[in-house]
Image (cartoon, rainbow, N blue to C red):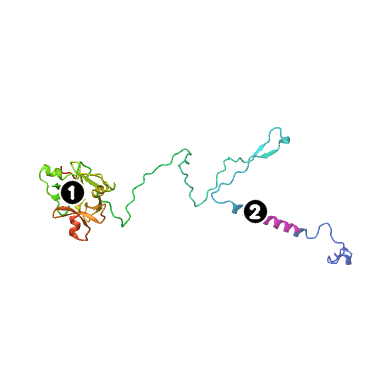
Amino acid sequence: MSEEKSRPPQDRPWENGWAPDTTRAPGTRRLWLAGALAVATVTACVTAITVMDSRPGEPTPAAAQPSTLSSSAPGGLISFATPSEKGTDKPRKEHGRPSPTPTTSAPPSPDAKPEHHEKKPSSPAPGRTSKPPKPPATHGTSIRSVNYPDRYWQISGGYVTLAAPGSASDRGDATFERVAGLADSSCYSFTTADGGYLRHRNFVLRAERSDGSSLFGKDATFCPRPASHSGAVMLESVNYPGRFLRHRNFQLRLEPYQHDGLYRADSAFRLVAGLG
């Protein structure tokens, strides 16, 4: 039998006279394992962050290429080139959004003059009275009755009657010149071939020479109003508002307006091309 003594228990080194092994620090294996686990954890975190930051479809910025310093640099050190502000880096694209289309219009020059657009005439507001039709732009105007379309205003014996002119002389007496109203330029006055005017006196229409008075100018001025018949007008007196020219027994007179079909027909006239 070997005389080698059995190894004393290691849990009580001092009591048994056995010295512990001090060549290896206690817990070294645990420290190595903890360090390896920490390194693995850090590596996993860095990898996850890198994967999350890189988006699909985005080019990875190229790393700065090292460039050697000039011969004046000591020791041949290596430096990294600083990326230029006007480099080749392309802006990132926004996924799912179309790129804006650049406008082709240049900013207006300070010397450029503003364009003047022609204004379109506005349509009349509802409820307003439409303007009466204008007489034809011919030499002379004849005035025809609505309810007697074969009859016209005609001078006969100094008065204005409603007649059917047959001869050339009659057609001349049935032709007048429409001019701006003597008392109101927006209304009408009618001149005769001999230089007279049509005016009302005692509410009867007649042909007379102008005496230049204000009364004559008002008596010879008539304002066109829309009639109830298409293309026709009613002629209202300037100095007797509400009175219109109408024919009665084929004589032209100035009478107050009446809500009557016969009155509206007798006071409606069409301004046509001159007969003479």
Left or right: residue 154 versus residue 96 is left
Q: Identity of the amino acid at label 2?
A: Val
Q: Residue furthest left?
A: 167
Image x and y of residue 84, in percent: 61, 40
Q: Nearer the viewer, residue 226 or 169?
A: 169
Residue at 10%, 43% in the rendered image: 167
The label on residue 214 is none
- The amino acid type, in three-letter code, at marker 1 is Arg
| Whole-percent x, y for residue 161 in the image | 14, 50
- How many C-alpha atoms fall within 10 Å of the one at disc 1: few (<14), some, or many (≥20)? many
Callout 2 touching callout 1 (CB < 8 Å): no
Q: Main secondary structure of the magenta part?
A: helix
Closer to the camera in the image, 265 or 84: 265
Name the residue that disc number 2 marks. 46
Of residues 99 and 142, which is closer to you in this image?
Answer: 142
Inter-mark Cα distance, 2 to 1: 113 Å
How crowded pointer 2 is (Cα within 10 Å; few <14, some 14-19, many 20+) is rated as few
Secondary structure, mark 1, is: strand
- Give the residue at x 18% y 56%: 265
Q: Which residue is mark 1?
A: 206
Confirm whether residue 153 shows in the render: no
> Secondary structure beneath disc 2?
helix
Between disc 2 and disc 1, the foreground one is: 1
Residue 83 position by quadrant: top right
- Quadrant hosting residue 105: top left
Compared with residue 168, is residue 50 higher up or lower down, i.e. above or below?
below
Which circle's residue, 2 or 1, is located before the other in the chain? 2
Q: Is residue 26 left or right of residue 144?
A: right
Is 222 colored magenta in this rendering? Answer: no
Task: Give x and y (percent) for residue 143.
Answer: 18, 48
* Residue 44, magenta (yes or no): yes
The residue stretch that appears in magenta: 31-48
